[in-house]
Amino acid sequence: MSHTFDYDVLFIGAGHGSFDGAPALTAAGKRVAFVEEDRVGGTCPNWGCNAKIILEAPAKVLQTIKQSDGVITDTAKIDWPKAMQRKQKIVDGFAPAIRAGMESAGIDFIFGHASFVDEHTVAVGDRQVTADKIVIATGQHSHRLAIPGKEFLHDSKDFLSIPDVPGKMVIIGAGFIGLEAASIMQTAGSQVTVIMRGSEALPAFDKAYSDQLMKHLAAQGVVFIKNSQVQSVEENGSAYTVSTSTGSYPADYVLDATGRIPNTDGLNLDTLGINYDEKGIEVNEFLQTSQPNIYASGDVIKKEQPKLTPTATFESQYIVAHILGEETEAINYPAIAENVFATPRLAKAGVTIAEAKAAPDKYDIVQQQVADDWYRLVDFESAGQRTLIYNKNKQLVGVIEISDKADDVVNALLPAIEFGYTAEQLKRLVTIFPTIGYSALGYLG
């Protein structure tokens, strides 16, 4: 082990694109450090997935009560300040716990913004730190519309700390963040309007399914304005007016959910000739940048794979294995499951309907109405459709479902998709009954 450098491996960013893999390096005797300019853990634990699901949980319970058709008769509502207090108490524990775990593994933390000096050196404030290998894992930040009144817009980080339920809320954008926020806040008591630049939501999902999700949210009270261009936001006393090409909409809170942008600014990548654009840093099949000793991990990568926490985890573990020489093959991404945390859920994994329709010689498509399954009635579900994609060997290769339990169903089916289980192998699974996993596996084929 050479001591020419301060560290063997330096991670820029201490999120899932780093910390899930890093301890294996110190276990192998490597000297490792993180450079972090904000909270340890990155977006997901502090201002993303974890915070969102904690706030979504009471909304999901309340929506279930509303769907119970009077079986549950007590009046229920969300005490939003208490829900927010609970969220913050849980979230505040993540960063110190992650840091303590990394430090106990022998990993150092350097706080500040990192900027490359050369391929082995980064400047952090007045300090220069050197490393043999460097991993860029800086993640993404929220896009902000460049319109008059942009200072009145809030991003997803702001939203996940919203102090109270606004009477009227306008959400700009109908992607994951926009629809999840709409589902939570409409259930919590806000009147939500979603402004859509086009006519389709959730471009990563089959249109028929994303349309169904919008239909269900609309039935709950969410208003969707399609093919509308936001022009400005004006302050109107203590409220706001969102002016668009289709009209003006009053709001007490405006969420800009128009996407996320990779964090490449200020890294001084141009000096090293590292290729990147507005979609992220370009990497090869080993997740190396154009400088072979510099890798990129997580949401900052320009890639076709979904930019999700589990994807970043997979990448960080791959990079560590590659650095240690334990992995010499190109990264082989598994089937990656995606889910919209609305009520109902919308989840998918594997081969898509569009891919299957484009190759009928390879795939068979099976449609199922799962809302009529007796077990779905137990929790008062009112929506349910599933599409299964099989190859010609009758192995499951893809699934998409809309239902209140779609996330659990796709998780249950994911091993079959990833490992190519046959019908005979699936029959060997004697699962717990009655559960959603039993139901999901029982209706394959």
Image (cartoon, rainbow, N blue to C red):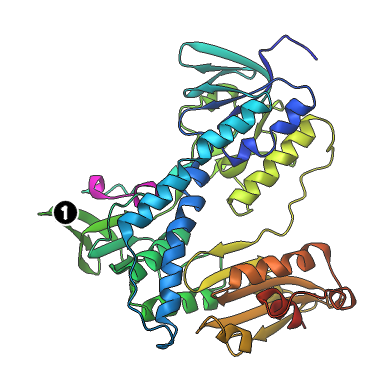
Nearest the eye: 142 or 19: 19
To which quarter of the image does residue 317 belong? top right
Question: x%, y% of residue 157?
Answer: 39, 47
Q: Which residue is drawn at 59% across and 49% down?
A: 309
Report the predominant secondary structure element of the magenta stretch. Answer: helix
In this rendering, the answer to whether 67 lies above or below 298 is below
Q: Position of residue 128 (x, y in %)?
A: 55, 12
Total numbered labels placed on residues in the image = 1
The N terminus lies in quadrant: top right
Would you name the residue on which mark 1 appears? 234
- 10 Å crowding of disc 1: few (<14), some (14-19), many (20+): some
Residue at position x 45%, y 41% in the image: 92
Image coordinates of residue 73 in percent, x first then y, are: 37, 84
- Is 153 contained in the magenta span? yes
Residues drawn in magenta: 150-159
Residue at the top extreme of this rendering: 4
Along the line of sight, the residue nearer the viewer: 339 or 207: 339
Task: List the single residue furthest toward the right.
Answer: 424
Say if residue 284 shows up in the picture.
no
- Residue 350 x/y as whole percent: 70, 65
Q: Residue furthest left?
A: 237
For the C terminus, the quadrant is bottom right
Position of 192 compared to 258: left or right? Answer: left
